[in-house]
Amino acid sequence: MGNLFSALLNSANALQVYGRVFSTIQNNVTNASTPGYVKQDQSLVAMPFNPAVGLGGGVQAGPLLSMRSEYLEQAVRNQQQLLGSAQQKTADLAQVQPLFDTSGNSGIPNALNEFFNNFSQLSVSPSSQVSRQNVIDAAGQVAQAFNQNAAGIMLVSANVVNQTREAVTTVNQLASQLAEINQHFRANSASTQDAGLDARLHAVLENLSQVANYSLIRSQDGTYSVYLGGQTPLVVGDRSFPITADFSTPQTIIRNAQGNDITAQLDNTGGSLGALIEENNTTLPGYKTTLDTLAKNFADTVNTTLSQGVDNSGNPPAVNLFTYNAVAGAAYTLAVTNITPNDIAAALPGAPGGNGNAIAMAQLANAPAAGGFTVTQAYGNLGGQVGRDLANAQQDKTVQQNLVTQAQQLRATSTGVSLDEEAAKLLQFQQAYQAVGKLVGVLDGLTQTVINMVK
Amino acid sequence: MLARIQSIRRRLDALRIALLSPSSEEIVNCLPALEEAVPSCHQLELELPDDSDPLARLEIRIALHALQSDLQIAGRLIEHGAALHQGWAMLLAAAVGGYVATGAPAPLTAGGTVSLEG
């Protein structure tokens, strides 16, 4: 009878245990699409069996095993950081590039072309009031083109500032969520086995990786601490330490909870926030400075050349053609003065009424203005730089999208099956990568050779 | 020549898709096509249009830069995948075999069986 009871108990117990196995499988299926969820495996443990001493054997449920690989999770987060940065740069630079039309059909190149052409026309009829007025109008077009270009960059900068505020808000919200999850872990150690809580935790971590660069440390109590830039505590245990964005200066400053400047820890270190900081503190100011230098050099050269001639009355010109405010930005503030058509110094001092200075002005189109380049070429170089920056960002984004997909696919197939199978699989991969790596390297070298021949 | 470049790009795209999937078999299946692409790439040098056709040269240059971009993506995927698997192998080896005297994980070996038929 004892044996019969044992057998019945064992069977009933086994049914209960296998019921848990099926519940686990059901939960895996139900949560297949839940962000951050990984498969759970109900482990089984054989109970002691020794009929001689009354141990009836059977099976009991062991711990719930997560199939999560923290190594692969970190690999996905690393690539997400880089993708977040590349996506942000691509989106923002795509707003800048249209400002720089280097085709000559519009914008600054077209305005410069018209300006110098009008001086050519003036050289044909230097006393013509119509030609003189056309020169002033064309100068106004150049000033307006520079103003619009500069204003466009300032508008992009304003967008970047707004997006930086949103990114900081997102970081703080995710930090709060993580702190709240840590509270559960601290309050009840068994909750570290909770698949749902674990899924939420890793979803938050992955979302955070798209925004900012951080390091992650897991404590013995199961809580996760986050350090921005590897240094600044954002979440420690069940407490979060919000960051703030300070725009009291033209540069973006990110401050920790104590008000200290932590910008350098985040600038261009990954995530959309890193990209936004770099754009506002380096990239956009760089474009603006180059444009301002171009505008200043152009205005100064024109004013200097005109000052060397004489106006319609045979006198040195009393007023410049262009004015600007270097502090507020030469490109943004470039303007035509209250010069009149008779003030235009088209003639040279020794030949009043002539066209010598008008010719000299027209020839400025081909004269070195900045770094040995004409003003139009220098502007083209700036436009080219913007185009290259955007192309590089787009290529980075494409590469990173592929790398994120690769890391995610690998994570999804991590099953924790037998170690022998895993080892065999890894060795096969190593051999496959070596083989294709050699061929891609050969193809890359051949392609570069052909590109060099086509140039 | 453009057709040849497009053909190489298609093979690289197949490799890219294989590199995204967590299967070494799919990567190895791309090897024959890549091996054929190498002499095809050599052939490009012989088919360059001369200087009298600048438009054709421009088209070729654009296509070659696109090919170079595809090669960069494939190269990064190979580097990244290899680094991931290498790291994973080190973790597995350490978990299974511990560490050697130098502090490096023990070499990873895969268990196998030998069967004989008489």
Image (spheres, rainbow, N blue to C red):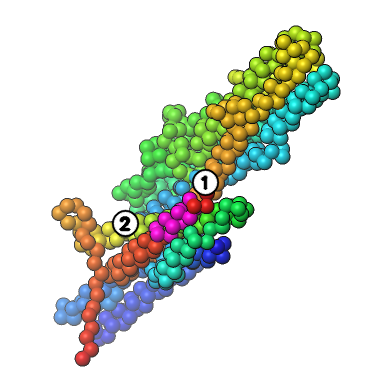
Q: Is residue A280 above or below residue A318?
A: below
For the residue labelled by badge 1, is the local secondary structure a helix, a strand or a loop? helix
Q: Residue at x 55, y 28 (%)?
A: A372
Query: Looking at the image, which is closer to me, A55 or A86?
Result: A86
Q: Position of residue B47 (x, y in %)?
A: 52, 61
Identify the residue position indicated by label 1 in the image: A392
Q: Residues within 10 Å of mark 1 (few under 14, many from 20)?
A: some
Disc 2 and disc 1 on one polypeptide chain: no
The amino acid marked with disc number 2 is Gly
User: Could you tell me if residue B41 is visible in this image?
Assistant: yes
Q: Is residue B11 magenta?
A: no
Identify the mark at residue A3; answer none if there is no mark: none
User: Could you tell me if residue A190 is visible in this image?
Assistant: no
Q: Is residue A262 above or below residue B96?
A: above
Q: Residue at x 34, y 62 (%)?
A: A434
Query: Looking at the image, which is closer to me, A88 or B58?
Result: B58
Q: Position of residue B50 (x, y in %)?
A: 56, 55
Which label lies toward us, 2 or 1? 1
Q: Position of residue A317 (x, y in %)?
A: 73, 11
Name the image quarter holding residue A438: bottom left
Q: Main secondary structure of the magenta part?
A: helix
For the residue labelled by badge 2, is the local secondary structure a helix, a strand or a loop? helix
Identify the residue position indicated by label 2 in the image: B87
Q: Position of residue A121 (x, y in %)?
A: 78, 27
Tell me the quadrant of the picture where the N terminus of chain B can be found: bottom right
Span of residues in magenta = A441-452
Chain of residue at mark 2: B
Q: Residue at x 64, y 29 (%)?
A: A366
Chain of residue at mark 1: A
Q: Residue at x 21, y 77 (%)?
A: A49
Q: Is B83 left, or right, of B6 in this rendering?
A: left
The amino acid marked with disc number 1 is Asn
